[in-house]
Amino acid sequence: MTVELARHTGRSFDAAVRAAAAAGRLVVQPRMGFGDAAQMRAGLLAVAGARAATVGTITIDSYTRTGNLVAAERAIAGGQALNGFPLATHGRAVTGSVIRGVGVPIQVRHGSPTPQPIIRAMLLSGMSATEGGPVSYCLPYGRIPLAESLANWDETCDLLAAPGVDAHVETFGGCMLGQLCPPGLLVALSLLEGLYFAQRGIGSVSLSYAQQTNERQDLDAVLALRGLAAELLSAVDHHVVVYTYMGVYPRTEAGARLLNDSAARLAARTGAMRLIVKTTAEAFRIPTIEENVAALESAATAATAPQAAATETGEVRAEARALVDAVLDLDDDVGRALAKAFALGVLDLPFCLHPDNRGLSRSYLDVDGELRWSDIGRMPVPSFATTTGSARLTSSGLLRALTYVERKFDDQALSAEHVPELETQTPTTGDPHVPHR
């Protein structure tokens, strides 16, 4: 495929993030996507104008994410509201009018295990920064076999590594399932997908980690990810991006704000360069442009507050390194190694129902809210990572674990008398941003 040299190149995305970091500023980024082109442009311009160091996001709609381009076209023709931007349907001219002169680098976020049409449209429109991965966009919520996802991402990497394309790819591997996945496995998956991209010719990558349930563990995890990335990915440009908690969100505005700001402090304390923010509307609906900008500015302010430097215990690093080494020992090709690892149970996601996941591992929250293994299945993790004799989660215990962060931050907000009454809306089940990854 022949494409024009991208105007918003992937390396310029990474360079902008690095330049902000050199100036002592955390880059903050929304999960933002609108079906209407004018609204999408307004959102990008608002992000660019925020009182923060920002990069823009174009998040793809669910129809496009799942490959149903006919439905996306019908929705546009019928004036139907979409939960993201239908990049592959709007076409080059419309997308060009959306991104032209925005003033900040833009990343396309899509959530698809079949991303080739999206990536082709992205490159033709003049953008080359995106995210995802063959494991992270398949096992958590995909329906296709892992082998098929790997083949799709091999083709996608060929597009992104083609002559004249200067791509940046962010792995979603550190965000698997959003919650209840112990940090060592998240760090390992992020690194492995980063290695997969690098092996397939992508010269600029970012490594993700999603905030979990315990600050000490999160600090340890992000420091481990940075340290191991420096060892394993020294041949490519890379930086670390932290995601604000991806699970059940607080129902109060103040609780949501506390959680978003705590993620900003996590990123700042650990030297991560970029943060994906969430808003005060997260539990109920897709946020407005104004709510996204408020979240960006709040997080940017929180990141500048004086705070103690983070220190690493080494536990997460040891677990992640053991898993990475075990996978890489399976095959010289990282993609084939990943497929073998899941088939053998060397990698095994707790509570993941995809048929290509062995499903032998289980996790739980200890009394301090730290994520621990109650059963490691066949994974070769260090002995300290497992709590011997710990009980498996019951259905009620699982529900409490899933809502732990929601209750923790809402309780903090209420006890500090920061907020009025709880929202009277009924919260959505799951994440209203499902494609907003």
Image: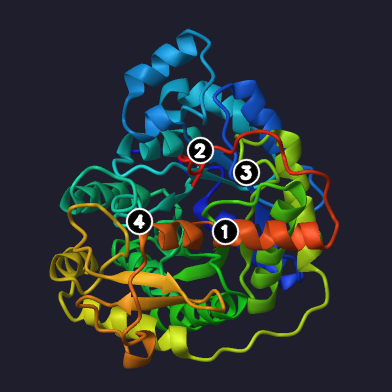
Q: Quadrant of residue 183?
A: bottom left
Q: Residues within 10 Å of mark 3 (few under 14, many from 20)?
A: many
Distance from disc 1 to disc 3, alpha carbons, whole Å, reads: 11 Å
Residue positioned 32% across, 65% down in the render: 350
> Would you say the residues marked 1 and 3 are in contact, meaning their CB atoms lie under 8 Å apart?
no
Front residue of this view, candidates 202 and 173: 173
Q: Tell me the number on the disc at residue 132.
A: none
Marked residue nearer the N-terminal end (3 or 4): 4
Q: Confirm whether residue 86 shows in the render.
A: yes
Marked residue nearer the N-terminal end (1 or 2): 2
Q: Which residue is mark 3?
A: 282
Q: Residues within 10 Å of mark 4 (few under 14, many from 20)?
A: many
Front residue of this view, candidates 6 and 415: 415
Q: Position of residue 274 (x, y in %)?
A: 62, 62
Marked residue nearer the N-terminal end (2 or 4): 2
Q: Which residue is mark 4?
A: 136
In the picture provided, is 344 more to the left or to the right than 218? left
Q: Which residue is mark 2?
A: 126
Q: Tell me the number on the disc at residue 245.
A: 1
Distance from disc 3 to disc 4, alpha carbons, whole Å, reads: 22 Å
Element assignment for label 2: loop
Q: Residues within 10 Å of mark 1 (few under 14, many from 20)?
A: many
Marked residue nearer the N-terminal end (2 or 3): 2
In the picture provided, is 407 more to the left or to the right than 202? right
Front residue of this view, candidates 34 and 307: 307
